[in-house]
Amino acid sequence: SFEGRVEVYHDGKWGTICDDQWDDRDAEVVCRQLGLSGTPKALSWAHYGQGSGPILLDEVQCSGNELSLDQCKKSDWGQQNCDHIEDAGVSCNPFTGTDVQLCQLDCCPLLLPPLAEGTVRLAGGRSPSEGRVEVYYNGDWGTVCDDGWTDLGAQVVCRQLGFR
């Protein structure tokens, strides 16, 4: 999945992040840390539901260039003045530049924007940064034959997906 409530692991436990100062630069760092490309968007007020357990971070202020939240300016771990109604979330929308409409329950279908020809994705991997290479072409997803496949091709796909 490319969106949800942000939770961090620190000192042996998982916890949420308070949305005070939470913005798209923070979301950009979270998306980068998770290895997700796309348009980063910060969401506030427990948009993806309230967490439980500790609220571990508050006042997160990233510049957007950091590799992980650990490198961002923030309150000390566990120092916060929030309730779970302020849990921070992010969307790392892979459909760059367009919105995705999600509906409650079964009231309507998931509406996704049309994909551009040549869009690539990884499928069947154990993490978002690995898997079988698939390409969107002529309205369908297809695989890539490995004849002549080299590290150079893999590097191109990784760059297309926003990896370094």
Image (cartoon, rainbow, N blue to C red):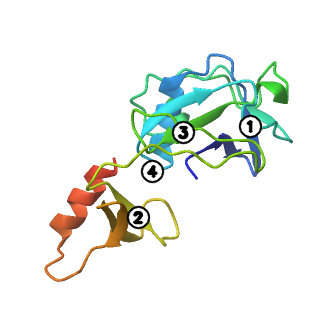
- The residue that mark 1 highlights is 16
* Left or right, 106 with reference to 40: right
Amino acid type of the residue tagged 4 in the rendering: Gly
Q: Position of residue 15 (x, y in %)?
A: 76, 41
Amino acid type of the residue tagged 3 in the rendering: Val
Q: Position of residue 147 (x, y in %)?
A: 17, 83
Q: Earlier in the sequence, mark 3 or mark 1?
A: 1
- The residue that mark 3 highlights is 100
- Indicate whether 115 appears above or below 84: below
Q: Looking at this view, is 83 or 56 the one in front?
A: 83
Q: Is label 3 in a helix, a strand or a loop?
A: loop
Q: Is label 1 in a helix, a strand or a loop?
A: strand
Q: Contact, CB < 8 Å: mark 4 with mark 3?
A: no
Amino acid type of the residue tagged 2 in the rendering: Leu
- The residue that mark 2 highlights is 122
Q: Residue 142 falls in which quadrant of the image? A: bottom left
- The residue that mark 4 highlights is 35
Between the residue at mark 1 and the residue at mark 4, the CA separation in whole angstroms equals 19 Å
Q: Residue 16 falls in which quadrant of the image? A: top right
Amino acid type of the residue tagged 1 in the rendering: Thr
- Indicate whether 6 appears above or below 42: below
Q: Earlier in the sequence, mark 1 or mark 4?
A: 1
Q: Contact, CB < 8 Å: mark 2 with mark 3?
A: no
Find the residue positioned furthest to the bottom: 147
